[in-house]
Amino acid sequence: MKHLVYNILYCSIFILLCSCNKKEEVVEYGSLYGFVTDIATGQTIKSAGVELLPIGLKAITGADGQFEFTKVEAGTYQLLATKAGYKEYTTNNIVVKANNDDKPVNIQLEKLPPALLVVDNSGAEIDSVDFGEIEGDVLRSFNIFNNSEDPLEWEIVFVHDWIESFSKESGVLKAGATQAIVITIDRTKLQNGFNSTVAHIVSDNGSKQLVIMATSVPLVETLAVSEITPTSAVLNGKINKKSVSSIVEYGFVYGTMPTPTLENGATKVTINGTAQVGTFSAALSELKEKTTYFVKAFASISEDVYYGETRSFVAEEMPYMEVTNKLMVQKQDLGYVDWYSAKIMCESSNVGGFSDWRMPTQEELMTLYTNKDKIGGFNGYVIPNWTGEIDYKYWGSDTRTGAGWTFGVYVDFSNGYVNDDFIAGTQSTGTHNIRAVRTIQ
């Protein structure tokens, strides 16, 4: 028993001595702060998330892009910065000291490409859709693609009244998903000529603008008067739209008043037969020499009358002139038409009693351009609703081929430049002026 008491006493003394030799550990703390900015612009980024690893403390940047961690145990850490629309960024070896004399940690984030993309059915990015000018063609489609790893909320904003509808105007896309959109337009609300508007496709991660274009051709056009003599002339017009089947009467009104109409007593010339898409003409006689006449083409559908633009001409002699001893040219344009129509109009012309009029070659067009002031009448064509833009391009008979396609040559009489337009089937994509010439025998 005595030995047991001694053993307990020795153990207690040993434990006491050990505890007296052990030093108390002291934990030191510091703080950490910094700024998150855009690497491209240098602008501070608000509401970015910053996490201190590996301990998992989190902070959100304020309006000035600043973040701060207080009472952090001294040591080495990592910082993870995140923000929607930006790449994640991790900084290593961030040292927190107890004396709080550290400089701010600046983190720069790189923006991700916009998640919202507007693409066609092949996946290629697009920024416009064109409805062209074909009557009845009122549908086009495109796709909204979410090019991110997060859901994307989107909306289409548009204001133009000729945009009838989008098949879907808002929604949420999953990551990597595509939403097909169909646009429907109302061609009856288009202005004559070229129309365009912009649809804004906005989202919580990027926005796009989609330009929507459509062209409306007038029901009827007044073409240039041809084969003018002191007492006669040929009036020319063109019907454009497929609603031609509804036309009950068409032709021309003319007189010495600047704005001839059926309502103000102008002389009416009606074309016999059923109206068809294409050009039509009427011959006038018994005109007064050196008198200025004004003419409009017209077409009636039910009780509505549609007019082309007003054209004027002077009944005067010599509607042609000799440019060189080998080349004769008409003094008036035959019209503003496609390449194939221009060829037909030239070869069908009978000005001055000559029946061998034709399209000028490129070389002859340059001769006409050089002498345009002497010849006169190269005033171009005012494109309707194109804010007064004038087309001074004149077709030539030359064609060229490339990559399996055929192109018709023209010369721009505003500057003498030579260029061409693609010819497809029986129509060219371009519409330009035409002036007939003939070879002097």
Image (spheres, rainbow, N blue to C red):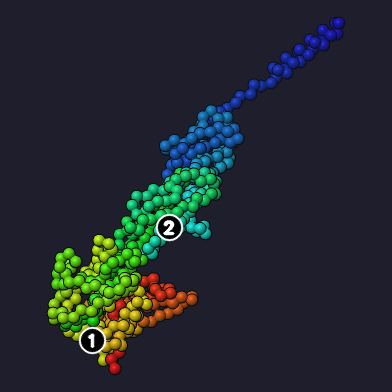
Question: Eyeballing the image, is 178 above or below 318?
Answer: above
> Residue 129 location in percent, x, y?
42, 59
Task: Report the residue at 36% width, 71% height from top.
Answer: 430
Q: Is residue 383 left or right of residue 92?
A: left
The amino acid type found where label 2 is placed reads: Leu
Task: Report the residue at 52% width, 41% height from top.
Answer: 82
Residue furthest to the bottom: 441
Task: Report the residue at 45% width, 48% height from top.
Answer: 168
Residue 378 placement: quadrant: bottom left
> Residue 133 location in percent, x, y?
37, 64
> Residue 125 location in percent, x, y?
48, 57
Q: Quadrant of the N terminus?
A: top right
In the picture, the disc for residue 352 is: 1
Mark count: 2
Question: Eyeballing the image, is 356 above or below 156?
Answer: below
Q: Which residue is mark 2?
A: 139
Q: How far separated are the C-alphas under marks 2 and 1?
A: 49 Å
Label 2: few (<14), some (14–19) or many (≥20) C-alpha neighbours in 10 Å: few
